[in-house]
Each structure stands twice: as C-alpha cells, then as structure tokens.
Amino acid sequence: MAKITDVRAYPLRTRTALVRVSTDAGVEGIGECSPMNVPVMCHFVETALRPIVLGGDPLDTERLWDAMYYGTHKLGTAGTQPSCIAGVDIALWDVKGKLLGQPLHRLLGGAVRTTFTMYKSIGGGGAMAPDEMLERVREAWDQGFRAFKIRMDWHYRQDVDPAKDLEMFRLCRDFLPAEIPLSFDANNGYSVPMAIRQGRKLEALGAAHFEEPVAPTNYEGIRQVADALDLPVSAGEHEYTRWQFRDLILTARPDILQPDVVKCGGLTEALRIKALAETWDLPVMPHMTQPTIGNAASLHLCATIPLSARPHEYTGPRADLDGLFTDPWEFRDGTMTIPDRPGLGLTLDERALEAGRER
Ligand code: CA
C-alpha cells in the first residue's frame, strides 16, 4: 500500500494553481485548481485539504474525496472548496495511473475515443467590434482550428447591444465554411425574452450551440430559453458537484451539460456527474479554460463518455504553459490525441517549474 507523504500547491506565473501529491512509492501526481484566485486556492489546498489526505492511500480516490468534501463543507460547497478538491483529486488519479501503469481513461472506465476535435474558444467579444472578433477567428483558422466558439465575456450586464452581438456572429459565420461548427456564448448577458429572440436569430444563422444565455442562477429562465428554441442551449460551468448538477438538470433542463473538471470537484465527482448526464440522456460538452493539466484531465474523462462527441473547448496552445512539461500534448490539424502514457500523461520539467514559480 502506498501512502500520501505530502500535498503542495504552488502559484505559477502562468496564473496556475498547481497541486503536487507525493507518495512513499516514488510516484508523484499533479493536478490543478480553477485559477479564480490562485493564492487563495493554494492556501486552501495546503491548510484545509493537506491535513485530511496526508497518510492516506492514494488509490482510495472516492474515500479521500468524501473525506475532503465532508471535512471542509462548512467552508463552502461551491467555488473554492470543490475547485481545490479538484486539484488534489486529479493529482491522486495521476498517482493511481502511474502506480498501475495505465492511462487515466482506462482507469475511468475505458475510452470510446482518444482523438478530439478541439474548438477554439475566443473570449472578449463584448468589448470588441465585430471585425476584431473576425480577425481572431481568422488567426485561429490559420492555426488549424476547425471548430469555434465566440464568447462575450462581459460582467453582469443585460441586453446592452444585441444587434452588435449578432453582427459579430454573422461576420464570423460568413467567413467559416458551412460545415465548420461555430457557437455563441452569451456569458449570462441576456434577459429571458432577449435570449429567446437572439437564439432564434442565431439558430437561423446556423449556430452550433447557444451557451449560457441568461444568469446562471436563473434556472427557470434557462428552462424557458431551452424550451423555446430548437438550438441546443448549454449550461453548467457555474455548477459544482453532483448536487448542483442534479438541480440544474431537474429545473433548468439545458440541452447540453458543461461540467468543468477543475471546478466541479475533479475526476471523482465528474464521474458522478457523468452518471447523472447519462441518466437524463444529456450530452456532456465540458467547460475548460486550462490548456494543460485541466485539459488533459477533461479529455481523459470525455474519452469515456459516449455522449461527449461534440468538439472540446480549448483556449489554444500556450508556449509558457507547454514549457512547464517535458512532454506537452500536441495540437495538430484541429485535433488533440491522448498520448498512451500512465496517469494524466504530463511530466513536469523541474527546471522550468522552478523558473515559473511565483515568488
Ligand atoms: Ca462559457
């Protein structure tokens, strides 16, 4: 039996909350938390979670998840707590894969696919003119992307300039060949009636999916929009743990679920959310803004989900992040393939890591 000997969380200059779990078996695992506030996340991992898992068996992923969750649930069961549990949980799965000499998708149940079409997720649309967004789409096309989503990324607003949003989508849609998927992420910026009107127009323009049309807390509103449109409506990046996904499914009834493995509680919890998705026959199209560790964990998970056939979110290759690993995953011809290596399949370059640590 292996034993967990240390749990550390490091803030990196890349705005990464890196988690490292050491064991007495000579194997170490890596994970990351959602980087909403990196110093806070790292502090939570080291002060709240580390004492709970120290001395535990890294193969006991569910037992350790429960211990972390119930040991800290009074510190909040959304946001920081499940995201920090995610960082540790992913690192534990990485340890498990390395100890057993298996890629994670095999331990998570077996892959139905290991190659994914990655869609370029382009944010900042709310502050851009339509032709600026078109330029970003062109650049991503030249990088090899063959699926896209434009995100408005505004903060708490409603119905500010819907005509401009549509014009932006139309310009990008006209540039891309008809068979290339393009989605629209409203980032919660519409009222329910506006979301329905915009959604009908996006549908006519051929949008692949309509993401987060209204406030994430407005489950009834999401349901009204999803019921009114044929265009698939997605939600879930603001939900944490199986209990919030249960409520989202029962009340909001989105057409597509978007769990984020570095937010929702890690791979252990994502498997439970997968079971809910399959119970309601709902496709899973994850939210993912972390292009290395988070992305790897998300692809291992999606490899095992038959209803996860849509393109996977990707903010694009980043040299500063890829440089932290001796074996960064390759993005080629718009796709990414899970390498056949134990665990997550990513190895830290210790020298690059030392240089990249936030002091
Ligand atoms: Ca989104």
Image (spheres, helix red, strand yellow):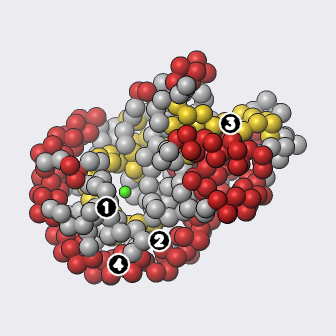
| N-term-proximal mark, 3 vs 1 | 3
Q: Is mark 4 within 8 Å of ligand 1?
A: no
Residue 180 visible in image: no
Q: Position of residue 160 (x, y in %)?
A: 18, 63
Determine whether the residue tagged by mark 3 lies in a helix, strand or loop.
strand
Query: Could you say which disc has been placed on residue 282 in the image?
Result: 2
Q: Is the residue 292 above or below the residue 154 in the image?
A: above
For mark 3, does the 10 Å Cα neighbourhood hold few (<14), some (14 to 19), or many (20 or more) residues?
A: some
Q: Label 3, on which residue?
A: 8
- Mark 1 or mark 4, which is nearer to you? 1
Q: Is residue 301 left or right of residue 186?
A: right
Cα–Cα span, label 2 and label 4: 19 Å
- Mark 1 or mark 2, which is nearer to you? 1
For mark 4, does the 10 Å Cα neighbourhood hold few (<14), some (14 to 19), or many (20 or more) residues?
A: many
| N-term-proximal mark, 2 vs 4 | 4
Q: Is mark 1 within 8 Å of ligand 1?
A: no
To which quarter of the image does residue 67 belong? bottom right
Q: Label 1, on which residue?
A: 156
- Mark 2 or mark 3, which is nearer to you? 3
Quarter in which the C terminus is drawn:
top right
- Mark 3 or mark 1, which is nearer to you? 1
Q: Label 4, on which residue?
A: 221
